[in-house]
Image: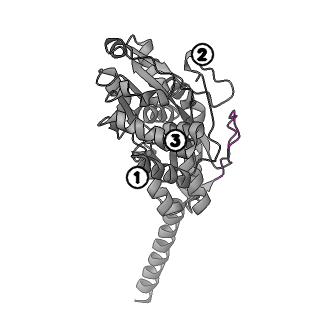
Amino acid sequence: MKKKVKNLTLCFILASMLIGLVGCASNNSPQKVVIYTNADKEAVQAMQNSLNTAGYEGKYVLQSMGTSELGGKLMAEGDKIEANLVTMSSYFVESAQQKHKMFADLNFETKALEKYPAYYTPMLANTGAIFINTQVIKDKGLAMPKSIKDLTKDEYKGLVSIPNIMNSSTAWLLIQAIISEYGEVEGKVVLNKLIQNCGPHIETSGSGPIKKVRVGEVAVGFGLRHQAVADKAAGKPIDYIDPIEGNYTLTESIAVVKKADTATTKLAMDMAKVIIQKARPELIKDYPVALYQGEIVTDVNKAGNPKIFAKPLTVELLEAHQEFFKAAK
């Protein structure tokens, strides 16, 4: 009987040791990296291509969200967010870090052209501009606009499309240009007239205006410069104008969330490095703004009137400019 008890005791000890070893192995082995992103499909594909080519296929889960949705999660959840790796509009990354201190410093050299905080580096950049349907402009005998303010003239009534800043960060490029050039008092008048001329053509997505300009539903729009450049190069009746008020730019950046699971955090850091070093050649084709040393952008893709907003871009500033937009209606 004593022998049986002794054997059972040994079995329990061995079982406990095995469970402990499995637990240790589990703690030291990385889980799948969860990636949250607000990037559009071209950028998502470039990220996936770089990761899969580098041997990370099956080691990550990528989930796309709208800017407002992902921004809300970052601000509300901090490092409790499910994601290990985030690609997001830079101003949201900065605001989330300021509130939660949730991102780890990157452990790789980026060679970025500009100086950025240690916890993120830009993945891509978008620049705003005016674009037109040359055939519609000709058919309706419209003057070629040179500025955003030109689009408030009566001849453009019902023929303008812009994105809505309540839904699209692309619209922030427009609002920055108006406020910088005209101030908030005159700027509100300009924006009011612009909104009136748009009528039903205020779009919830940044790509909405170019789609309406392409089909000739409107004559002119405001949105992402590179889309109009690509359309013109493809032979479509599209042209682009760098407005007097300036071409403003927003970056989307990559950051690693600090987690207790150090193995998965390390894997997320490795993936961030791959995306920045290997995906950029593909990304710069769709988002032709040079961000790193050695990158070359053709002259046609260089904005003619680049400007930077006087104040740092933060979630609080975005909310203030959203209120400015609503008050101008």
Measured as percent of width and height from the top left, residue 325 is found at 44, 47
To which residue does mark 1 refer?
A: 69
To which residue does mark 3 refer?
A: 187
Specify few, some or many for label 1: CA neighbours under 10 Å numbering under 14, 14-19, or 20 or more.
few
The magenta stretch is 105-117
Residue that extends furthest to the bottom in the rendered view of this protein: 1
When the figure is inspected, residue 267 is found, relative to residue 258, above or below; the finding is: above
Specify few, some or many for label 3: CA neighbours under 10 Å numbering under 14, 14-19, or 20 or more.
many
Q: Which mark is residue 57?
A: none
Is 232 one of the magenta-colored residues? no
Is 111 one of the magenta-colored residues? yes
When the figure is inspected, residue 134 is found, relative to residue 219, above or below; the finding is: above
To which residue does mark 2 refer?
A: 299
Mark sitting earlier along the chain (2/3): 3
Q: What residue type is labelled 3?
A: Gly
- Which residue sits at x=51%, y=26%? 147
Specify whether residue 74 is in view. Answer: yes
